[in-house]
Amino acid sequence: MSEPRTPTAVDAVAEQYLDDYSAHDPIEATMLGVLGHDDRLPDFTPEWWQSGSQLRLRTLAALERAEPVDRTDRITIAALRDELEAREAVYAAGQDEPHISVMFTPMQVIRDVFDLMPTDTAEHWETVLTRLQAVPTSVDGYIASLRWAAERGEVRARRQISECANQCSDYVGPDGFFTRFTEQAAPQSGELSRTLRAELAAAGQRAAQSYEGLEAFLRDELLPQGRERDACGRDLYRLHLRQYLGSSVDLDETYAWGQEELARITAEMSATADRIKPGATVAEAIAHLDEAGTHTLPDTDALRAWMQETSDAAVAALADTHFDIPQAIRTLECHIAPTHQGGIYYTPPSEDLVTRPGRMWWSVPKGVTRFATWRERTTVYHEGVPGHHLQGAQTIYRKEMLNRWRRVGAWVSGHGEGWALYAERLMADLGFLDDPADYLGMLDGQSLRAARVVLDMGVHCELPAPAEVGGGDWTYDKAWQFLSAHANMAEGFRRFELNRYLGWPGQAPSYKIGERLWLQLRDDARRREGNAFDLKAFHRRALDLGSVGLDTLRAAVLQEI
């Protein structure tokens, strides 16, 4: 690593924001790997949401006063201002307090954060206990926010409320998460005292009871007030999409592009199916692969081992050749998540790159017991290297270049998820998906991401449905028919995916739209630099910026800022 740059006033503003934000949201601090907050939870009351707004406004005012001294400062100002203003617009529109969805709301993250906490020693379990004891207060605060918003006429769709009530059942009772989590407490070193075990059991029971209360509130009080309409509307959708992209796009043009991109991918899938089995349709080629069993894993233990092996092989092959991968971040742990909600996700290493490594998690729905590697190899590249792990961990590593907020706290979905999709396509270009089965898996994932653009934008902006589902207005049944036609996955996965889109507007399309903007940026850089263009250098230059909004990324890479 080179000599670190001298910290500036702009760095101080950004780092103060990271410190204040971590204290404000201890869950996010744990997810970001910021140490020192693992014993607390946010209270999620309306006052808590308001204090987040006040923090953003104070930081924006401080940014206005800070004088940039170099290009790095100018990029920090652009990136941080963009994030704060986008988040503040969503809050000002009244979208925070009523937020309930099947993924990444207070209801889920209160539980999910325990997956990330160290549990190797008795001292770690004492910290877990303190946080567990805060769960009832945090859940009650979330209920207070939902009730506060409902009193003002802001209630989300009945579908999301009902599905979240169903999710609560995974957390409660003798087979629920909190009971199993505390009963199975087993440090790698030392022993838990009888007192600590009893306190953990009691705290787990109280946490489970708080989710029983949440479920009752959702079913009995909030559900009757919920709206039938899933769509958020065009104006709110524009705010949400802007937040997830760090860029504004033409909604109608992007909707048309999504349909064109989906048609292109569908045609390429047909051609690939013919390579797998001459004359076969895509469905027939998939059936052939699954029946042959050559790309099949029998259980989650085999899945986890295969994930780890595939990830390790990618790191070994790409390091020092196609990418600069520092030795300190070449470890990535693969895990089966303890929940069954569906979805695959990555959590970055802790800020010190020691306390917690980067991790890839697979949340397997109940009843899913067999796994096809041809579907999942591309996902390992998406979540690991050269996808999220390379992107996130190497940014944390760049202490000599970036302030702590740029390294640890900045995350824009369109940038991060767009890069991960771009990384999948790059792995195909580099020959890692030359097996037609694996290549079909990559295309299958691309099909899903393109379908998300069409479905998410179409439903929430109330645009005309495609002719293949009868045109006219979107309905749940049309959305299900459309998704099923373009996503080759088990029904449980598809149901979760559809409910996710309907309850989290703008997030899912950020993957494919982000990839589109990454590809456009690479093409523009190649045209500008001509014969001097070097792909490895482009990747390094772009990733060294950290996760910034896509407008800021473009301006920085093309030397316009």
Image (cartoon, helix red, strand yellow):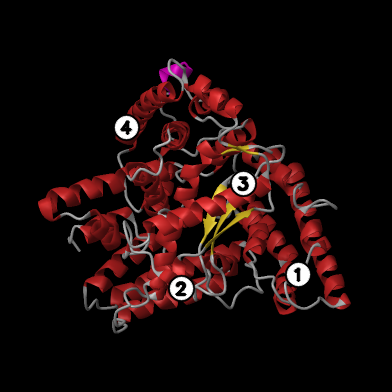
Q: Does the CB distance between marks 1 and 2 fall below 8 Å?
A: no
Residue 160 is situated, as x and y percent measured from the top left of the image, at 63, 41
Residue 28 shown left or right of residue 329 in the figure? right
Where are the magenta residues, as a range?
465-471
Quick one: SS at disc 2?
A: helix
* Mark 1 / mark 3, whichever is N-terminal: 1
The residue that appears at 33% across and 73% down in the rendered structure is 63
Pointers 1 and 3 in contact (C-beta within 8 Å): no
**Position of residue 521 measured from the top left corner of the image (x, y, whole percent):** 24, 49
The percent position of residue 440, horizontal first and vertical second, equals: 44, 32
Does residue 506 appear to the left or right of 10 in the view shown? Answer: right
For the residues marked 1 and 2, what is the alpha-carbon distance in whole angstroms?
Answer: 26 Å
249 vs 395: above or below: above
Which residue is labeled 4 in the image?
257
**Of marks 1 and 3, the one in the foreground:** 3
Q: Which amino acid does the dot numbered 3 rest on?
A: Leu
Tell me, for residue 360, which label it has, or none. none
State which tag comes first along the sequence, 1 or 4: 1
Q: Residues within 10 Å of mark 3 (few under 14, many from 20)?
A: many
Disc 1: which residue: 133
Numbered tag placed on residue 18 in the rendering: 2
Quarter occupied by residue 192? bottom right
Say whether marks 2 and 3 touch (CB < 8 Å).
no
Mark 3, mark 4: which one is toward the viewer? Answer: 3
- Kind of residue sitting beneath label 1: Gln
Identify the residue shown where x is 85% and y is 67%.
202
